[in-house]
Image: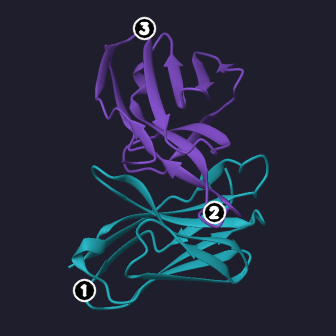
Chain colours: A cyan, B purple
Amino acid sequence: DAGITQSPRHKVTETGTPVTLRCHQTENHRYMYWYRQDPGHGLRLIHYSYGVKDTDKGEVSDGYSVSRSKTEDFLLTLESATSSQTSVYFCAISEGRYAGGTEAFFGQGTRLTVV
Amino acid sequence: RKEVEQDPGPFNVPEGATVAFNCTYSNSASQSFFWYRQDCRKEPKLLMSVYSSGNEDGRFTAQLNRASQYISLLIRDSKLSDSATYLCVVNIPSASGGSYIPTFGRGTSLIVHP
């Protein structure tokens, strides 16, 4: 299994509080992604990173920010959590832009509940 | 319209059956294609890549039709353990063109019963 660790694995937080989720990889892969998964929507991209300090928005980026100060770490921050951000969050990594992109490997997910 | 479309199912089949899933994508510049499997409350895991020439891995066969922009997955001799959600993934060029983004269909649910 690819070396990807997400923390925390489960979190309950209150509306309006900031929350940071961490993704750590040991594969030295260039690309890192944050997705959220909700019933009826599948996995939707929040933000992704194509290198240290290089990030871009995905389909559902409103209310989220990211940072990548080291190759191995990609942080997702909910600035002020809302109930609509209750979801399962997955981090993924991929090796790079080769032949149209390589396969992605996923962390085990973080279950976030905003009450 | 979503960029990657799948029939959500569920597909309910008996053990030993052959079942096929299809997936369509809208961006003709897409380069790489994959099928993933996701078990309940777990992370998606790569099942197989999909090549233009078609490829097979045991009971699983994947095919790509670039002209029609669809991908298929065939499972032969279904097992109870095949019950899961199957996700079609297409690497789509980013708006800037500098990256390829794994983009998911909503998944197709398969239930294999005795």
Q: Position of residue A105 (x, y in %)?
A: 62, 53
Q: Nearer the viewer, residue A53 or A114?
A: A53
Q: Which residue is mark 1?
A: A14
Labels 3 and 2 in the same subunit:
no
Q: Is residue B68 left or right of residue A105?
A: left
Q: Decide: marks 3, 1 in contact (CB < 8 A)?
A: no
- CA–CA distance between discs 3 and 2? 35 Å
Chain hosting mark 2? A
Q: Position of residue A62 (x, y in %)?
A: 38, 78
- What amino acid is labelled 1 in the image? Glu
Residue drawn at point x = 31 percent, y = 73 percent: A85
Residue drawn at point x = 59 percent, y = 25 percent: B65
Chain hosting mark 3? B
Looking at the rendered structure, the secondary structure element under dot 1 is: loop
Q: Which residue is mark 3?
A: B16
Checking the image for residue B67, the label placed there is none
- A92 versus B104 height, above or below: below
Checking the image for residue A4, the label placed there is 2
Q: Nearer the viewer, residue B42 or B54?
A: B54
